[in-house]
Amino acid sequence: MPVIVILAAALSWATGNVIARRAGVSSGFSMVVWSALVVPVPAFALALLVDGRSAVEQSLTDLSGTAIAATVYTAVGASLIGYGIWNSLLARYPASAVVPFVLLVPVIGIATAWIVQDEVPSVLEAVGGAVMLAGVAWATISLRRAPAPAPEAAAQSS
């Protein structure tokens, strides 16, 4: 089941990127705002279905400051700002130039945990992070160095 969930998440991410790219909006923020208006309704219905009414009511009445701060960070920082920037980049640049930067998420997470919570990464994590950084650098540098020929130039050379 976990593998299926991971594959479904990857498919969802890819589908969202394709839709964002094809939507052709000039601002990624507008797409995020409109999509944010749709998500709470099915999420609330799913919580009622899975957890039950009493658990949902209790979780809404017993909100802590930490829970509220985490929700604000997720809604504003990660969703509105993060996806807004991401969708704007997808609208302006080819997906092949933007998507490699997603691979930096685990590296930034490990570095942030190291800086903020003093969680020292293991040797394996440090090596993995270095491999990820090298891979992203290689992908983005090789994309800039060898641009694809224009379609009319490729047709003339054939």
Image (cartoon, helix red, strand yellow):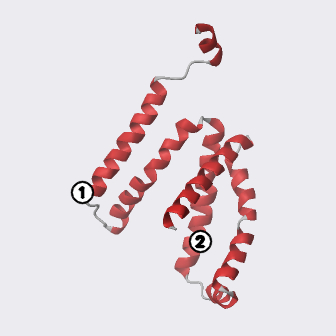
Vertical position of residue 144 compared to residue 23: above or below: above
Q: Amino acid at mark 1?
A: Val
Residue type, numbered disc 2: Thr
Residue 30 location in percent, x, y? 73, 51
Q: Residue at x 54, y 72 (%)?
A: 70
Left or right: where 74 falls relative to 110: right
Residue marked by disc 2:
71
Q: Earlier in the sequence, mark 1 or mark 2?
A: 2
Local packing at callout 2 (Cα closer than 10 Å; few below 14, some 14-19, many 20+) is: few
Out of 40 and 85, give the one closest to the viewer.
40
Measure how far apart labels 1 and 2 are at the Cα level: 33 Å
Q: Nearer the viewer, mark 1 or mark 2?
A: 1
Q: Mark 2 falls on what kind of element?
A: helix
Query: Which residue is found at the position 60% from the left and 41% from the top?
Result: 89
Name the residue nearer the viewer: 20 or 89: 20
Q: Where in the figure is residue 127, as x and y percent of width and height?
A: 28, 51
- Which residue sits furthest left? 123
Q: For residue 123, which numbered disc appears in the image? A: 1
- Residue 25 appears anywhere in the view: no
Q: Is residue 70 left or right of residue 130?
A: right
